[in-house]
């Protein structure tokens, strides 16, 4: 696992340990004519020995989700079961104000939730701006497994959930309702730190099977109907069963403009380790965007098919959690700044 560090583009390129793979992902940048999709999976050396199962998630609170995922796997569940059950733990935590029950509502005082799930076979399901549903991650899985669609939104997503036998739940807690009423008096925008603590959970099973999921109540006091990066396949989450999986937390409006998680996976496909792929994705966005990286809130976790993992982001306070058969730990991710 990486030690706390701050990286700029220059220090990343000059880091000796990163040099060989950095040559692949930075020095050997694809020309405009080349398509990412035409690149083959390459590894600079022999394949590393797989160290799995492993679950990696955003923030310290992800640890509980990781551990539930690991327990689900140990009890005979598959990787998708593990991801779903792990995220459900976070969704019921009323003290987490940016995911599920107890999440911060939109400007109208309604909790609208986004979630998605994806497996190693490029199957995906997603719900956006869904209301009154305790476990959006489970509805996302139902969309994947029981419909011909990938994504359902708003009233249609809620209707589908109820038709599947899910009971509606009031998701606005009294504590959040009072906070919202206070907010109505000033309507001051929430800070990034207060507002964007999505759970993204990715994992690699013992045999290298990859899966991932993502769930959030999104930007606190957002406009009704706003959808962030979290339910968008390729933005808040992406899984390529041949390569790796990545998930995002941060400001959805910025992550989704660059298909952040897809980029992380593509950097891994071209030889980067998960940590290097997260770093390079943040740097790539920073190079293109007029905003300074420090204001973009772009944070990623990733795992590859060998069970290697990492995290990096533009937020100095971004942390992530890892669980292996040996236990769990939460630590600072690499901070990437200009
Ligand atoms: N990353 C969560 C959101 O912006 O909604």
Image: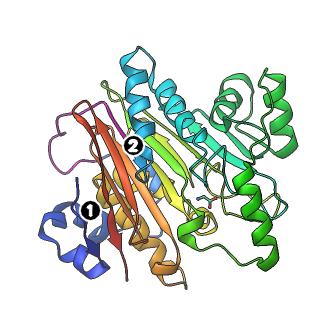
Q: Is mark 1 within 8 Å of ligand 1?
A: no
Placement of 54 over or under 281, stated as above or below? above
Quadrant in which residue 287 is drawn: bottom left
Q: Which corner quadrant of the figure contains ligand 1?
A: bottom right
Q: Position of residue 86 (x, y in %)?
A: 49, 33
Q: Is mark 2 within 8 Å of ligand 1?
A: no
Q: Are marks 2 and 1 in contact (CB under 8 Å)?
A: no
- Looking at the image, residue 284 sits to the left or right of residue 309; the answer is right
Q: Which mark is residue 299?
A: none
Tell me which numbered mark, 2 or 1, is placed earlier along the sequence: 1
Choose between 120 and 236: the one closer to the eye: 236
Residue at x 40% of width, y 15% of height: 75
Main secondary structure along the magenta-highlighted residues: loop
Q: Position of residue 16 (x, y in %)?
A: 12, 69
Residue 48: in magenta span: yes
Residue depicted at 60% across the width and 40% down the height: 91
Residue at the extreme left: 16
Q: Between marks 2 and 1, how big is the CA–CA gap?
A: 32 Å
Q: Is residue 15 magenta?
A: no
Residue at the spot 40% in from the left edge and 37% down from the top edge = 66
Viewer-side label of 2, 1: 2
- Magenta span of residues: 42-55
- Judging by the rendered image, the residue that carries numbered circle 2 is 63
Q: Quadrant of residue 122?
A: top right
**Residue drawn where x is 68% and y is 38% of the image:** 136
Residue 276: percent from left, percent from top: 30, 60
Per the image, the residue denoted by label 1 is: 24
Determine the secondary structure under disc 1.
helix
Query: Could you tell whether 278 is left or right of 166 in the image?
Result: left
Residue 193 visible in the displayed image: yes
């Amino acid at each position: 696992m990486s030690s706390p560090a701050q990286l700029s583009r220059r220090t990343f390129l000059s880091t000796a340990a990163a040099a060989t793979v950095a040559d692949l992902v930075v020095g050997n940048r694809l020309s405009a004519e080349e398509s990412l999709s035409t690149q083959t999976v390459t590894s600079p050396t022999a394949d590393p020995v797989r160290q799995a199962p492993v679950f990696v998630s955003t923030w310290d609170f992800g640890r509980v989700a990781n551990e539930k995922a690991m327990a689900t796997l140990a009890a005979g569940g598959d990787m998708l079961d593990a991801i779903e059950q792990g995220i459900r733990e976070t969704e019921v935590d009323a003290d987490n104000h940016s995911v599920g029950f107890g999440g911060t509502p939109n400007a109208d005082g309604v909790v609208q939730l986004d979630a998605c799930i994806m497996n190693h076979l490029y199957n995906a399901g997603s719900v956006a701006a869904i209301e009154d549903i305790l476990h959006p991650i489970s509805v996302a899985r139902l969309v994947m497994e029981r419909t011909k669609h990938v994504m359902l939104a708003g009233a249609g997503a809620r209707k589908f959930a109820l038709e599947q036998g899910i009971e509606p739940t009031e998701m606005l807690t009294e504590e959040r309702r009072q906070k919202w009423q206070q907010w109505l008096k000033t309507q001051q925008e929430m800070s990034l730190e207060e507002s964007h603590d999505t759970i993204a959970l990715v994992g690699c099973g013992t045999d290298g099977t990859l899966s991932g999921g993502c769930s959030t109540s999104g930007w606190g006091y957002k406009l009704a109907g706003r959808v962030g990066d979290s339910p968008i396949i390729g933005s808040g989450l992406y899984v390529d069963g041949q390569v790796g999986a990545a998930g995002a937390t941060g400001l959805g409006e910025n992550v989704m403009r660059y298909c952040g998680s897809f980029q992380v996976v593509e950097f891994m496909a071209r030889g980067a380790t998960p940590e290097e792929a997260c770093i390079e994705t943040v740097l790539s966005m920073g190079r293109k965007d007029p905003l300074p990286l420090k204001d973009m809130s772009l944070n990623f976790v990733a795992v590859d098919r060998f069970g290697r993992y990492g995290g990096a982001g533009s937020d100095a306070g971004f942390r992530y959690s890892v669980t292996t058969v040996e236990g769990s730990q939460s630590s600072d991710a690499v901070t990437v700044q200009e």
